[in-house]
Structures are given as structure tokens and as C-alpha cells.
Amino acid sequence: MDPILDGLNPAQRQAVTSPNPILQVLAPPGSGKTKTLTARVAYLLSHHGYSPQDVICCTFTIKASREMRERLSKLVGERVQSRLILGTFHSICRRYLCKYGYLIGLKKGFGIADSDDSRGILRRIIKKLNSSIEIRAAQGRISRHKAHGLTPDELAERVKADELELVDIYRQYESALAASNLLDYDDLLVRCVQLLREHPDCVSNVQTVLVDEFQDTNIIQYDLMNLFAAKNRRITIVGDPDQSIYGFRSAEIQNLKRMQKRYSNTTIVLLESNYRSSASILSSAQEVIEQDTTRPAKKLQPTHSHGTMPVLRKLPTANAEAHWMVLEIKRCVAMMGGVLGMSDFAVLLRSASLSTRIETAFGRAGIPYKMVGGRKFFDRTEVKTLINYLRVVSHTGHTDALLAIINVPPRRIGEETIRQLTTGAEKAKITLWEFIKDVIQGRRSTEKKLQKAAELGLCALLKLVEASRQKLQECEDPSAPRVLLEYITESLSFQDYLIKTYPLDEDSRWANVRELMGQANETAVSSGDPGQEEELPEIEGIEQEQVHVGEETLSRFLANVALATEATTQDEGEKVTEKVTISTIHAAKGLEWPVVFIPAVYNGSIPHSRAEVVDEERRLLYVAMTRAQALLYLSLPLRQPRLGEGDDSSTTLTPFLPPKLVKTRFRPLGPQLLEKVVYSIADILRRPRPAAEELYKELHSLPSTLDDQWTTEGEEKDKGTTKAWNASLEPHDSEQPNPKR
Ligand code: ATP
Ligand code: MG
């Protein structure tokens, strides 16, 4: 048996080996789409003789590319895998633009504006125009227009008179980006489309294109896919319309139909067995999605036993809900004889803002966790500061980064100086950096003469950045990001600065700095995209831009930081495995965990009060539920503190849950039942069954009831209400675990 086909079912094998050039694999969650796509890449390389550098494979998140590279390493070897053009659409586009952007007039060494930068630019424009448009709204609308390929001029022709204000903002935003030689996320895609339309030869080597999570591609990504594949017209996509959850970002479910129309020779393969979840989790999830009567019915067979029913738990408050999760996680780990460890648990959230209480509760209870999909790590002040230094060194046009570090650590550069400098730069139509340099070198002057102290401060900053740029030039190898970080922290006496400024937690802040250095080092070893990645192949007749290895590694490191959007994980570098994952549902796409918690399943949270498309909210819940392999917990607080208002408000259960689930009652687990439950979990996870005496170990160290927990946690507010609420709670096996066997 061919090892690539080993362990695949007949339908999966059919997809992997299909000789048809245009292939769509459409299938529900957990049916092995990603596994099949990965095997097809390996199969095309080893059986069709494609060279890895002629294969483009697009994943939706950086984490997914990393996992795919790992799987491929095993199938085709490290060396072959590293030559594939594999990554997110954004990262692949960035690579093409670095090499060939000069063909469409991009300046060398462009920087990437992340969401924060974009907002910073928009804030300044909106203030200048005295407009009442909200910054985030403007950002969203501009992004949508870009995703549809509309330039400000084209937009101006279409919109009504009262929308011309946005056109104006859009236009100024584009000029601001251009002036600083920055591309925003949308530009990476839009400019790459332009490049490939005008210079299709750049991808003339490409033999085949493969796309995972196709249901969430937008129009531009769809265009890109076709442009990548223009020469040989060989495309494989895998997807599931029921899991389309990026409509708010202009993803187009219609792309599936569009593709079938465009390529009349499309072959469709359906996969119908689910290998991920217990039969009871699967059927509950099915009942959720089947409420959408407009979708075509689909077959989906479980391959696992029934297992434990999903749990729906109501708690008095959001804090109580967080504590209950703590207890339940501890209880599972203590009870299950080593079958489950901390890293087997995930808490999936509709909105990242729900994480605060949970993080606090986990922190207090000593439950190790990592936050995925938030911007947690790179948002820590000290990390952000250093990243901003690197961004200015890499690209002095990063005005927002420059403003963020201009007086950090303090250099006696005050608000007034900054105002004078920014207006001066604006008037002179040059970047802030160029203006500061001119002022210090006496070529230009500010409205009023700068104070001596401020001038000295600017001088010091200028010197440091120039010296770092010089160092970067000299560093002809991939260690550049780390070398620069060391140089900058040393020159700034950054550790002393942290000690002085944050005497209470300078330790953990310095640890974050060290962690950042570790991540910079990883970029050097494994290059950024992620995993090992080599240069794009040479194409005859087209010159590639020559790159300086140090500059390229730095810019790739920064691009990875910038591209780590909601859909990606950021604490990857931490390398500690035994941690509970807390993630947004969006960022959990394509992944799986033995135990999944979905808190806050109430109206207003899911469906979200601001959601435009209710069906998309239901699909979100479906995606979240189908991440679970063996145990699934849904929960909601009965009262929810209203933000900004003193009063609690009561919650109502989301309408998406099937009646069966809402009515389920739970009995305390006796020893025999426990054994059954644990063995079924072990079987679903294909892990060894523990000996019976291993079960219930250490359980006595846990508080025996939830009630105890609340009072010992000093939840003053909850105390009085506990009894009343307890009456309305459904009995649940977590309340009276039986430590005596
Ligand atoms: P999603 O829609 O959530 O992205 P998917 O269809 O991509 O799911 P995979 O992640 O590829 O599904 O597979 C889900 C799980 O099932 C994985 O653990 C995978 O290893 C396992 N699996 C897939 N196919 C088989 C098979 N034929 N035999 C055993 N396990 C399988
Ligand atoms: Mg998948």
C-alpha cells in the first residue's frame, strides 16, 4: 500500500488520486478534508512528478500552514516540503510582491500596515476632515471596497452624494499609505492580483493550486486562486458551506458555484464519515445546523460510539460560569486516570472580550492557558514597544510606530513638539522621519524653535535608529531580528527602564522581552511563513528583486507579527504544551480538541447583538460544537453585567440549541458509570484505557460543590443569590462527585 493513501477511506482516496484537473471536495466538519488535501499535495508530488516549488497551497491561518507542513514533512520529507509555496493568501502574496512588486511600481522594502496602523492613519484623517464617521466603521467599509477591487475613483462614480465623505477619507488613506510606502492587508491581495494580471509570467511555473477552507475565500482571494492557476488550470479546493463564518469580511459562499460555472469540468467529491466527534456531539451539532432549512440536506455518518451527551449548564453569573469551568477542568483531569491533560481542553468564545473573566479565574486557580486569536502577546506594552522599534528600523515610513516610540523610554519629547513635527511633515509632504532628520540636521525648521531638551531627545532617537539600520545592513544572515533586538534593548537600557517604570512586575515584562527574542530567533531558524520556506523559483526572462538576507528576515518577522490577525495564533512561540486553549471561535476553524467549552450561549452573545446575518451566527455555533471530540460543554450565566451600566440584566438562552439538549438532565457519576464514560473517551481519542484504580485519583483535593467554591472565592455578590439560583439550576454531575469508590 502506498503510504500516502494509508489510513484513508475510499472516498478520500478517490479525491487524493483523482486525475481530474478541477476538483472540489465538499464535506462536513471532521470528515478529513484537510487530511485529504494534504495527502493530495503529497500524491501530486510523488506520482505526477510536480516540483514542490511549482505547487501553491493556500491555508486559512498561519497555524494551519504550520500543521500542514508538519504533516507533509512526514509524507514527503523535510527538504521537499520546504520548497512548496504554502501559506495563507496574505503571506503568499507578500512573497510575490517582495520579489516582483517592482514590476507594478511598488517601492522596494515596503512595510505592512496592520489593523492598528490603519486605524491610526484613519484617525488622523478623520480628525483633520472633522468628520463624524467612526474610525472602525470607516476601516470596515474601506476594506470591503478594496475586497471588491474598488478604487476611490471608481467608488466616487457609484456612491450617492452623502457618501462622498467616505470616498474622500478612502482617497486620503490611500495617499497616506503610499507616502509611507506601506501596504495594508487588503493591498497585499489587491496588488498581487494586479501583478498577476499584468505579469502572468510570474506564476508561469505553477502546475497546480490547492485551497483549504474555500468557503471562506472572498472575491479577491478567488481571483488570486484563478490567476495562480491561469496557465495549467489545475485546482483542488476543499470546503464546507455550513462552516462559512467570514461573511462579515466579504467571504463569498457563492465562490463554490462560481468555480463550477467557470470550470465546466469540475469534479465534486463528497465525504460522508466523521472521524472527529462522538456520535452524540455530532448529532447535537447536526440538529443545530439543520434549523437552517434553506441548506441542502447532507449525509454525515459518525465513526465513533455515542459517548457522553453534551452538557448545557446554567450558572448565576459570568464569574460563577468561569469558576465552574475551572472546577470542571480540574475534575476531569483528576477523574480520568491520565486520559486527559490540560492541553486537551479548549474554551471557544464568540467574542474575544469574553476572555477577561475566564483568564482571571484560570489565573487565580493556577490553570495554565494560552490565548489564541486575540492579540495578546504582541499587545503587551513592552513587546509592542520593541516591535515598533524594529518596524521603524526596517521601514522609517512607519509613522505610527515612530509616534509610539518617540518618547518611550522618556526623552523629554512632549505633546507640543510632536504636534509641531507632525504638522511640519504634513506641510512638507514628507514622512515624519524625514522631517525630524531634516530638522535635526538644520535643513528645515519647525514653526517654533524646539526646546533644547526635546532636540537632544530626538537626536538620541535618530542616532539609535540610524545605528540600528547600519547594523542591519552589516548583518547578512537571518539572525538580524534577534541581533537588532539585543542591540536596541541594550542601547536603551531597556531592562533598567522596565525596573524603574514597572517595579511591581518588571520580571514578567522582561520575560516577555526574552520570549520575543526567542520568537525572533525562530524566524531566523525556520523562516517566517511558517516552517521552512525557500525562495520563490527563478523564472526565465523575469528578474527577481535582489534581497538582502538580514532585511528580508526582519521584514518577514514583522510581516508575521502584522499578519497575525484574528484568524491566527500568536503565542505559538511559547512552546509549553500543557495549557488550556482559550480562543475565539473564528480562530478555532479547522482545529479539534478532546474537550470543548462554549460559554455565554445566550441571546446577544450568540447570535451576537451586532450580527447582521443570523444564519452565520448559527454556523459559528456549529463550527464551535464540531471542534469537540469527546466532551462538549455549553453554558450561560443567568445574569449578565451590562457594560457601562450598573444593573445586571437577565439572559435568555440562544435559540440555536436543539430542544433535546436543553432538556438533558444529569446524574452524578457512580464508579461504574465513570468507568464506562472514561473508556468511551479513551476510545474516541484512540488513547490507551487507564486501569480502573487510576480513576478518581486526587479528586478529594477539589471542593465538593460549586457552592463551596463561590464562598471560598469571596464572591460576595453571588453568595446571597446562590441558594435561590441553585434551585433553578439543573442538577449536574459536577456538583456531587463521589470521591469514595
Ligand atoms: P474541518 O471541516 O473542521 O476543517 P476536516 O474535514 O478538515 O474538518 P480533518 O481535520 O482533516 O477534517 O480530520 C478530522 C480528524 O479526523 C483528524 O483528527 C483526522 O486525523 C481524522 N481523520 C480523517 N480521516 C480519517 C480516516 N480516514 N481515518 C481515521 N481518521 C481520520
Ligand atoms: Mg479542515
Image (tube, rainbow, N blue to C red):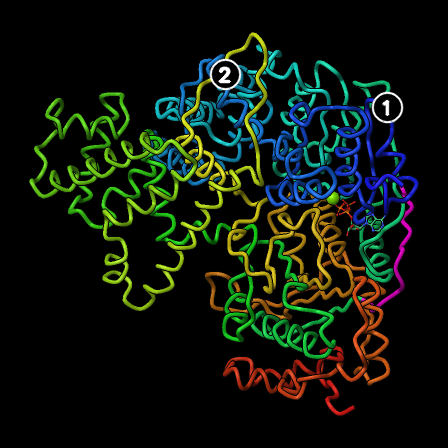
Which comes sooner in the sequence, label 2 or label 1?
1
Q: Give the residues in magenta.
A: 296-309
Ligand 2 in which quarter: top right
The N terminus sits in image quarter:
top right
Q: CA distance from mark 2 to mark 1?
A: 33 Å
**Magenta residue check for 54:** no
| Relative side of 332 to 30, left or right | left
* Lateral position of residue 647 relative to residue 620, left or right: left
Q: Is residue 151 visible?
A: yes
Tell me which residue sits at (48%, 35%) in the image.
Answer: 139
Q: Which residue is mark 1?
A: 20
Q: Label 2 is placed on what type of residue?
A: Gln
Query: Residue at horizontal 51%, vertical 56%?
Result: 574
Q: Which mark is residue 544?
A: 2
**Residue 584, above or below 362:** above
Amino acid at circle 1: Asn
- Secondary element under disc 2, as helix, strand or loop, is loop
